[in-house]
Image (tube, rainbow, N blue to C red):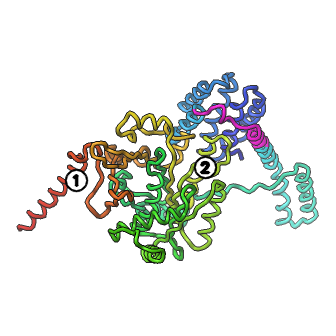
């Protein structure tokens, strides 16, 4: 069976070599595909494969200048308009951005091209063998028919010997069929029951709420992160990415009461740091929680007092929090092994916080492709295993320039401002841009947020997607306002005058108090 990645390789193979030496191989791939697989296989994959085949044909037959990336992007956009249904439009956009952003330094190496070429040749070989085996399946069927019905052992032996000879001649190796990460049989009650249970677990029953009412409001009806949902905080350096990622780990342990894990499993939150050391993260957590609970300075406490306070606080929580620190050799395979190790020890991970993605080792030497592949793998792991995932990503120089001319640049940050790879915008469910603002007239510091993307959620008002919070005067992050008076605002520059959000909230409270007073008179 042809897989989608074969045609992706073919596209990068053709567009990375202006001599045309790979064109005959790609033509052979297209020919074999059209001969035997045009109307077979997964419907969604076939739509995407036809999209890539159309691009390849247009490039080859149209003799497109392979050194002109604008010409390639024009072909991609044309094929996207003609072939892709609305649910795949973002793939076409991502592909066009990938080629538009590609520079000389991003071109695949000779080793990568050789690997792509080998992958295509191998796929063609196995598809042809598969078709040959289908034609010879009658011989195998007859052998078992003789053995089962007629018990003609001698005839069966002859047939089986012929099959063995055939396999030896063609040197066919057994290839396991792919195993889906999930499936539903629509006329099987048990299969339907399992799918509906999974749907319930990943609906609002399993939501993880943040400690900020403004953020929960911005995340729509669910009011938080759903199991399997992925979120990426995007900001310039020193604009709070690590703080936001760490906050989710604490929010999950503090506010997640309806855990809903499988029977016999222990719920856990995993915080993976590739930037800050574990002892620094521990002390940051301690300072935040100690000041929040005790409302006094921690500097007079000794080591044993700190240790006992942390233990007593977190041992009361139904969800355990683990912090793990790794170096730059940490890649997707080590990440999967880490998740497997927790599962084997009886834990069910409900949230992974990764600080942060770009520090992981990527497979592809072209950074923009490597990051796209890594982001896709991380998001798919979360979806498949059913835990929420939060990470961060750096913004580029264009974002820095934007911040110099706009008082609230976070409202204008978007896909084009992602560092090294704008294509990572596509895999994540939620993209949250953030930017720290200091108001010169007051000296007050605020974190401004904007939800730039939320997959499958289109009912959240635009006015809810942008919000701000003031930093604590002691510098220990932002105060949670869940269960308290809302603290989010819509404009840090007018906060001391009369912020629209705060005015609206005040009116709601006054009306509520008035209603209570009126009712109490009856």
165, above or below 416, in the image: below
Q: Nearer the viewer, residue 81 or 5?
A: 5
Q: Residue at x 43, y 64 (%)?
A: 250
Q: Could you tell me which residue is drawn at 42 percent across and 35 percent down?
A: 402
Estimate the spatial distance between the alpha carbons at disc 2 and disc 1, rounded to whole Å: 42 Å
Q: Main secondary structure of the magenta part?
A: helix
Quarter of the image holding residue 39? top right
User: As displayed, is residue 513 above or below residue 56?
Assistant: below
Give the x, y percent position of residue 514. Answer: 11, 59
**Which stretch is magenta?**
101-121
The label number, if any, that marks residue 505 in the structure image: 1
Please state the horizontal and vertical placement of residue 453, each as a whole percent of the image. 44, 45
Is residue 93 found left or right of 522 in the rendered image?
right
Residue plotted at (50% across, 36% down): 397
Q: Is residue 337 above or below residue 399?
A: below
Question: Is residue 398 in view?
Answer: yes
Q: Is residue 194 visible?
A: no
Number of residues whose C-alpha sits closer than 10 Å to that of mark 2, classed few (under 14), some (14–19) or many (20 or more):
many
- Secondary structure of the residue carrying tag 1 is helix
- Pointer 1: residues within 10 angstroms few (<14), some, or many (20+)? some
* Disc with the residue nearer the chain's start (2 vs 1): 2
Q: Is residue 297 magenta?
A: no
């Amino acid at each position: 069976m042809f897989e989608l990645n074969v045609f992706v390789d073919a596209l990068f193979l053709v567009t990375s070599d202006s001599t045309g030496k790979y064109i005959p191989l790609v033509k052979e791939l297209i020919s074999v595909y059209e001969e035997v697989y045009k109307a077979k296989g997964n419907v969604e994959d076939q739509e995407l494969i036809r999209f890539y085949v159309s691009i390849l044909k247009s490039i080859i037959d149209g003799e497109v200048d392979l050194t002109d990336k604008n010409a390639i992007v024009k072909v991609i956009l044309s094929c996207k308009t003609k072939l892709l249904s609305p649910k795949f439009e973002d793939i076409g956009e991502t592909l066009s951005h990938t080629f538009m952003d590609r520079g000389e330094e991003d071109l695949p190496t000779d080793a990568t091209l050789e690997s792509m070429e080998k992958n295509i040749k191998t796929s063609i070989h196995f598809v042809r063998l598969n078709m040959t085996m289908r034609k010879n399946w009658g011989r195998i069927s007859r052998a078992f028919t003789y053995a089962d019905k007629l018990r003609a052992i001698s005839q069966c032996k002859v047939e089986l010997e012929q099959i063995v000879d055939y396999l030896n001649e063609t040197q066919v190796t057994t290839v396991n069929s792919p195993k889906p990460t999930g499936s539903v049989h629509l006329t099987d009650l048990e299969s339907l029951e399992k799918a509906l249970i999974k749907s319930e677990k990943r609906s609002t029953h399993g939501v993880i709420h943040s400690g900020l009412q403004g953020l929960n409001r911005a995340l729509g009806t669910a009011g938080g992160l759903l199991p399997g949902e992925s979120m990426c905080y995007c900001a310039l350096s020193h604009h709070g990415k690590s703080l936001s990622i760490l906050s989710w780990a604490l929010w999950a342990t503090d506010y997640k009461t309806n855990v809903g894990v499988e029977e016999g499993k222990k719920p856990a939150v995993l915080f993976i740091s590739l930037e800050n050391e574990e002892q620094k993260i521990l002390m940051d957590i301690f300072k935040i929680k100690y000041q929040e609970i005790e409302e006094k300075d921690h500097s007079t406490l000794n080591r044993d007092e700190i240790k006992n306070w942390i233990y007593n606080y977190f041992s009361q929580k139904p969800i355990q929090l683990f912090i793990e620190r790794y170096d730059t050799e940490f890649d997707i395979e080590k990440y999967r092994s880490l998740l497997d190790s927790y599962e084997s020890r009886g834990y069910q991970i409900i949230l992974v916080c990764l600080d942060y993605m770009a520090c992981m080792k990527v497979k592809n030497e072209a950074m923009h492709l490597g990051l796209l592949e890594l982001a896709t793998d991380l998001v798919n792991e979360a979806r498949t295993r059913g835990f929420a995932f939060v990470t961060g990503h750096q913004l580029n120089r264009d974002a820095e320039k934007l911040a110099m001319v706009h008082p609230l640049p976070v409202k204008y940050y978007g896909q084009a401002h992602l560092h090294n790879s704008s294509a990572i915008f596509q895999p994540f469910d939620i993209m949250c841009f953030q930017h720290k603002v200091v108001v010169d007239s007051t000296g007050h510091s605020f974190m401004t947020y904007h939800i730039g993307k939320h997959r499958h959620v289109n009912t959240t008002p635009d006015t809810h997607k942008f919000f701000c919070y003031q930093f604590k005067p002691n510098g220990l992050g932002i105060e949670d306002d869940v269960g308290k008076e809302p603290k989010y605002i819509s404009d840090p520059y007018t906060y001391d005058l009369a912020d629209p959000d705060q005015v609206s909230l005040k009116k709601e409270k006054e009306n509520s108090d008035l209603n209570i007073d009126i009712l109490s008179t009856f």
